[in-house]
Image (spheres, rainbow, N blue to C red):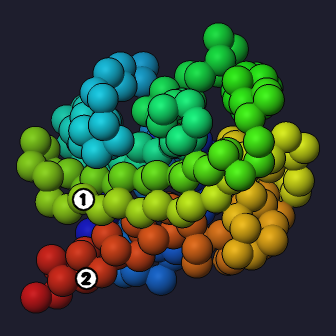
Amino acid sequence: MREILVATTNEGKVREIRAVMKDLPIAWTFLADLPSIPAPVEDADTFEANAILKARYYAKHFGKIVLADDSGLEVDALNGAPGVQSARYSDEGTDAANNHKLIAALRGIPQASRTARFVCCLALVEGDDVLLTSMGTIEGQIIDEPRGTNGFGYDPHFYVPNMGITTAEMPPEQKNALSHRGKALASIKGGMVQLWTA
Ligand code: ITT
């Protein structure tokens, strides 16, 4: 059976990727199953380039086919910030500190102008070769008061107007059906089936 290493240290991503990919005939390995190595410096300025950079780094080190995810939040009133810096937006880099900084940055901005989107780029890499990439987005608005306890990161502040709930209030299956990562995963899953069964 083909083996793929999912190269993320983010537990929230691991849960979502596992849930969507579980029915594929692939032996999934996660970084937590392997000896830990320093994380790569994610210094590219697009999500796609960072996903490829991350995947290549772990593919070379472990000699496995790697799936990597680079994702984040783009807030229109902040000119797209935190963007590719989403994980490291605050000095501490914790979810709580990142959310605190985000809400402070939006102080005084009316709700209608707090439009934002989550973006997810995935890259499947073997050695140096990029086998597949995919991207997904979900549109929403940033709200001051956190709502919900599911998900991770900025989810409690990411309100999806047409659902009337935040992504942290969505059950995991619903978030995976609608989210940036769910869409990117569905697309790359289709690509893998084509690549390996054609
Ligand atoms: P890896 O690089 O190990 O995968 P990371 O958390 O550092 O983990 P990123 O560099 O891609 O990953 O940063 C993504 C950040 O964007 C993440 O830490 C969250 O703060 C935010 N984010 C991404 N997807 C999210 C989601 O579905 N819900 C909430 N926040 C999300």
Q: Residue at x 81, y 71 (%)?
A: 164
Of the pair 17 and 120, the residue shown nearer to us:
120
> Residue 158, image x and y in percent?
71, 52
Report the residue at 65% width, 11% height from top: 91
Task: Report if residue 124 is visible in the image.
Answer: yes
Q: Which residue is under mark 1?
A: 133
Q: Quadrant of the N terminus?
A: bottom left
Which residue sits furthest top? 91
Contact? badges 1 and 2 (CB < 8 Å)? no
- Residue 5 appears anywhere in the view: no
In the image, 183: left or right of 124? right
Give the alpha-carbon distance from disc 1 to disc 2, as whole Å. Answer: 14 Å
> What's the mark number on residue 155?
none
- Left or right: 54 as drawn, with respect to 106: left
Q: Is residue 184 above or below residue 194?
A: above
- The amino acid type found where label 1 is placed reads Thr
Which percent across, then down, holds residue 51?
32, 43
Compared with 108, 123 (above or below) is: below
The percent position of residue 168, horizontal first and vertical second, equals: 78, 58
First-in-chain label (1 vs 2): 1
| Mark 2 surroundings: few (<14), some (14-19) or many (≥20) residues within 10 A | few
Compared across the picture, whether 198 is left or right of 157 comes to left
Q: Nearer the viewer, residue 146 or 54?
A: 146
Q: Secondary structure at mark 2?
A: helix
Q: Residues within 10 Å of mark 1 (few under 14, many from 20)?
A: many
Q: Quadrant of residue 190?
A: bottom left
User: Ligand 1 closer than 8 Å to the CB at disc 2?
Assistant: no
Residue at 54% x, 52% y is 118
Q: Which residue is mark 2?
A: 193
